[in-house]
Image (cartoon, coloured by chain):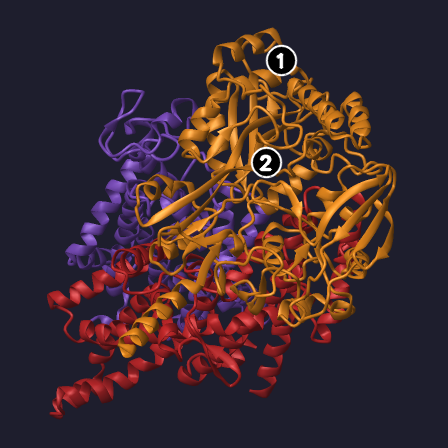
Amino acid sequence: MALYLLRRLMQSGFVLVAMSLLVFLGVYAVGDPIEILISPDADQIEKERAIRALGLDLPLWQQYLVFVGKALQGDLGRSFVFNEPAIQLILQRMPATLELAFGSMFLSILIGLPLGLYAGLRPNRALSKGIMAGSILGFSLPTFWVGLMLIMVFAVQLGWLPSTGRGDTALLFGIPWSFLTLDGLSHILLPAINLSLFKISLVIRLTRAGVRETMLMDYVKFARAKGLSPFRVTFVHVFKNIMIPVVTVVGLELGGTIAFSVVTESVFAWPGMGKLIIDSINVLDRPVIVAYLMMIVLMFIIINLAVDILYTVLDPRVRLEAKA
Amino acid sequence: MSATAAVPQVETPFRRFVSEFCASPLAVGGLVVFAIIALVAILAPWIAPQDPYDLAVLDIMDGRLEPGSVGGSGITHWLGTDDQGRDMLSGIMYGLRISLLVGVGSALIACLVGASLGLLAAYAGGRTDTMIMRLVDLQLSFPTILAALMILAFLGKGIFNVVIALVIVEWAYYARTVRGSALVERRREYIEAAMCLALPTRRILFNHLLPNCLPPLIVVGTMQIARAIALEATLSFLGLGVPITEPSLGLLIANGYEYMLSGKYWISFYPGIALLITIVAINLMGDQMRDVLNPRLKK
Amino acid sequence: MRLVLAAFGLALSLAGAQAQTLTMAVGAPVTSLDPHFHQLSPNNAAAGMIFGKLVEDDANGVLRPGLALSWSAVAPDTWEFRLRPGVRFHNGNAFTADDVAFTFARIPQVPNSPSSFAGFVRPIIRIEVVDPLTIRFITNGPYPLLPMDLSNLYILDRETHANATTEQFNSGAMAIGTGPFRLVRHANGDRIELERNDGYHGEAPAFARVVYRMITNDSARMAALLAGDVDVIDQVPTADLARLRSDARVSLSEIMGLRIIFLGLDHGRTDASPFITDNEGRPIARNPLKDVRVRRALSMAIDRNAITSRVMEGSATPAGQYLPPGTFAYVPDLAAQPHDPEGARRLLAEAGFPQGFRITLHGPNDRYPNDSRIIQAIGQMWTRVGIRTTVEAQTWSTFIGRAARAEFSSFLVGWGNNPDGSHPLRNLIACPSPERGWGNSNRGRYCNEALDQGLMAAMRELDNGARAAQLIALQRLALEDLAIIPLHNQTNIWASRRGFTVTPRVDELSMAQSVRPAAGR
C-alpha cells in the first residue's frame, strides 16, 4: 500500500510538471501579453522596457526554467497585471469560490437526497416520474442561461434577492466569509442554486438508482420479511448503503464544481477564483493562469487519489496491485 | 442505437432490450422527438425559409423583428429575427445541424478513442495500463471547461476545432468507464475460461470483453452527446466555439443573451427551447437505456 | 415640540445618510491603485478619485488648472507651471514643486510595470524647481503637447511615497493623494470604498461615502442597477438602451466620446494579401487594397447610418474623420461618407474588379460594444456590392497579437483618442518608426512620407492657430487617401437611478465626483 501510494504520488508529480509545461506553451501560443497590456500609444522604447520588465525577453525554454526554479521554492510568479504574487491573488479569491462550491453541494444534497429517496421508494407514482423528468431538465439546462433567468425572476421582477456580487463578510479563522452574515447569505443563494442545479439532478438520480438497487438486495428483502418497519428499513438499511456512492460522487464533483464555477461566477459577478481566471485568460496574465491551473490540477489529483483508494477499500474485486 | 446491434450473439438480448426500452413511454417519446429533430437538422437546407449563413440574404434592417413579422425580403419570420436579421426558425434548423454534428461527432470519436484505450489498459495491465491511466488522470485532472477554453484559444474557432477540443476533453471518460467495467469483467469466469482456451487476444477483447462493457458505454455515450452539445453552447457563449456567421444553438442563445433584459426574449428563448428539447430527448433515451441495461435491476 | 423636532431631525438625517452613500458599478476592473503602474483607463479613473494632477481635463476633455494654477511656455523649449498653494495630501503633508520632481522621477522606474507612463515624461530633459510653487520643464526642442501629456500624470508625495511599492498602494497603505476622495478599503477586482476628502481644494464631492464596484458582466451590471443594488453604472449595454429610455426609474447621461471605431486595411503588401482571393478562391497577385479606388469603394459600400441606428441602437455617430467635434484641429465641414452602393460598384469596375473579389474581415468579439455584430453587418454590405466577405471574430487576446503582426487584410479595431488632431495621426497613420516613436498602432502599415514630414513640423509648432491649420490639412490628406476607414464615434453612456445624475465624460472614465444628487430631490 505504501509503495503504491509513493508510486502514485510520483506519477502525480509528473502529471503536474507535464501540465505546467502544456499551459506554458498554450499561453505562449494563444497570444502576446504585451500587446494586450500595453497602452496602444506606447512607443517601441516603452514596449521593449515592458517586455524586459515581465521577463518575456528570454527564450521560452529559459522562461520556463526560471519559472520551475522559482516554483520549487514555492514562488509561482507575480501577476503581470496586479504585480502581486499569483498565489496570493488566488488565495485571496479562494474563500469566495469555496463557500460557493460548498454552498451548492450542500443545497444539492439538501434538495436532491429526499427527492431521490422518494422517487426510488415509490418509482411508479406520478410525483416520482415528475421528479425524474425534472432531474433530466436539471441536467439539460445550460448554466449561463439559467443564471440570467434566476436574476431576471428573483432579483429584477420579484426583487426578493440581490442580483449579483458578494454580500457582507464576517471573519472566521481570520478569513472573511459571507455565509456568516444575513446579507451574505442572501447574496450567495442565487449563484449557489445556479451552480447546484446540475448536482441536484445528479444526487436525485444516484439516490434513486441506489435505492432501487438496494431494495432488491437480499438483505433488504430479508429485513422486510423479518417484519422491520418500512421506516427502519429505509433509513437504516437502505440509506446507509446508498450514501457511499452519493458521497463519493459528490466529493468527486467538488473539483469540477470549483472549476465550473467559472461560468456562474462571471454571470453573478461573484469575486472568486473563476472570475479571476477568466479575466486572466482575457489579458493572458500567464503567472496567474499557470498558478491557478496547477492548483486545480493538484486538487483533482488529490481527490482522484482519495477516491481510488476508497474504491479499492470498498470493492475488493478491484485490486491496487492490478494497477501498479 | 445501431451500436446495440453489436450486442446480440447470445440470441435474445437485443429484442429484450427493444421491448424493455419501449416499456417507457417517456423514452419512446424521447426517441421520436430526437428522430424528428435529426430529420429537421438533416433536411434544413431544403426546408428552412432562409439560408442563415449567407450574408447576402441577411439585412440588419430586418434585425430583431418580433415573431410573426414580415421582413424586407418578404419572408414571414415565425420566430422573429436576431440582431443580424437572421430568421430564427432557419437559424434554429441550421443550428440544430451544427449542435448535433458537434455532439454526435465528438461523442463517437471520443468513444472510439476512449474505449479502445480503456480496453487496452484493462487487458494489457502493467506499464501500458499505468501510462494510459495517468494520461486519463492528466485529462480528468484538468477541468473540462477550462481545457476546452485553452484548446480553442489555441486552435481558433471552427466547427472542426470544436469537435477536436471536445474529443480531447471527453475521451478520458470513456476510457475510465470501459477500463472500470473491463477490469471487473476480466476476473469473471467466462473470460478466464476464454483465456484458458487460448483464444486470440483480439477475439477475447472484441468478442467477449467489449460486448460486456458495452452497456455502461452506451449509457455514458448517450449522456456525453447531451453534455457535448451543452458544452459547445457554453463555449460559444464564452466567445469561443463556432464562427459567428455560422451559429450553433449555443451561439444563437449567446447572441440573444444581451437582449433578454430588454424584452426581446425570442432571440435567446427559442434556440434555448430547441437546445433544451434536444438534450432532454437524448437524456430521456439514455436514462431508460441505463435502467434497461443495468443487470442488477433485472428481477 | 422639541421631541417632534428631534424626531424630525432624526428622520432627515437618516434620509441624508442614505443620500450620502453612492454605490456605482463599472464594467472594467481596476487592476492597481498605484497610479503609475499600468496605463489603463479603469486604473486612471480610480487614480482620478484619489490623486491629483497638475493639469486636469474636464468632462469635455478641455484642460483646466489642477494642482497647477497656470502654465506657459517661457522659452521655446521651457514650460513653466505655477502651482496651487495650500494643497495637502490626505495624510496632511503639504504639496510642493519638489513632490512634482519626485513624481516624475518615479514614473519611469516602477518595477514590473506592463505599461508605464514613461512616454509622457520622456520629452522632458530637465526639471528646475524654481521655488516651492514654481517648476520649469525643459524639453527636447519645442513641445506643444506638454500640458496635455501632464494631464495623464498623478502626483505623489516625496515624503510619503519615497519607497512605496505597488503592493503598498494596492493594500491601501500608500493610496494617499490630493484627490477628492480618500481610500477606505480596496478589495482587488471587486470593490473600492472611498470617503470624501473634506480638505479637497476643488469642488467638494456630493457624497460622503462611495462604494465603487466592478461588475464586468454587462447583463449582471444592468441587473444590479434595475434591482436597485447600485445607483450608477457605466458601459450601458446598447441592447437595453431603448427600454431604459422609456423607464422613468432610470436616467441616461450620454456624450459623444473620443473613441473612433474604424477599419484597418493592409497597405503593407503590394503582392497578394493573405485574406483576399478572387471569386474562385485563388490568390490575387496584386493587393487590391493598394488602389485608393478599391478603398473608397469599400467605404462607400458601408451604410454607417444603418450600423449606428440598428446595431449600435443610436449609441454612436457616423464618423467622417478621426475626432469628434469640439476637439483640437477638428476638420470643419467633413461629414461621414454617405452610403453609395452604386458608386462602390462603379469604382470597383474602374479599378479592374467588376466581379469583385473575396475578402475576410477580422475583428474582436469581446472588446468594443457590438464589435462582432458590426463586422457581420459590414460583411452583409460588402457582399451586396460584389465583395464576397467572410467574417471572423476572435477574442481580443488572440486578435490583437495577430493584428500587431499585420496578419490581416482588413480588420475592425477602435482607438481612444486624446482630444488633439495629432494623436490619431501619430499613432494610427504615421509610418511605423521606432526612432520617431510613431505608428505604434498602425497595424495596416500605411506609410506616407509627405504626411510624416508635415506632422514633424506640426509637432514643433507652439502657436496653436498655426498648428491647428497644419493638423487639419494633414488629416484631410490621410482621410482622402483612406489610410483607415472611419466608421463611427462611440457615445459614452452612464445610467443612473432616479435621484442621481452623472456628468458624462468624453474620455469614458467613470469617477464618483461626476455623480451628483439629481436636482429637485
- Label 2 belongs to which residue? C413
Q: Position of residue C1 (x, y in %)?
A: 26, 76
Report the amino acid beneath label 2.
Answer: Val
Apparent side of residue B164 relative to residue B30 in the rendered image (left or right): right
Residue A246 appears in which quarter of the rendering?
bottom left
Write down the colour of chain B: purple
Q: Residue B13 got which mark?
A: none
Q: Position of residue C450 (x, y in %)?
A: 79, 21
Looking at the image, which residue is at 34% across and 52% down? B3
Disc 2 chain ID: C
| Other residues around mark 1 within 10 Å, as few (<14) / some (14–19) / many (≥20) | many
Specify the quadrant that holds the C terminus of chain A: bottom right
Write down the colour of chain C: orange
Cα distance between the residues tagged 2 and 1: 22 Å
Disc 1 chain ID: C
- Label 1 belongs to which residue? C293
Write down the colour of chain A: red
Are tags 2 and 1 found on a single chain? yes
Position of B208 relative to C259 (above/below): below
Looking at the image, which residue is at 26% across and 51% down? B281
Apparent side of residue C434 relative to residue B189 in the rendered image (left or right): right
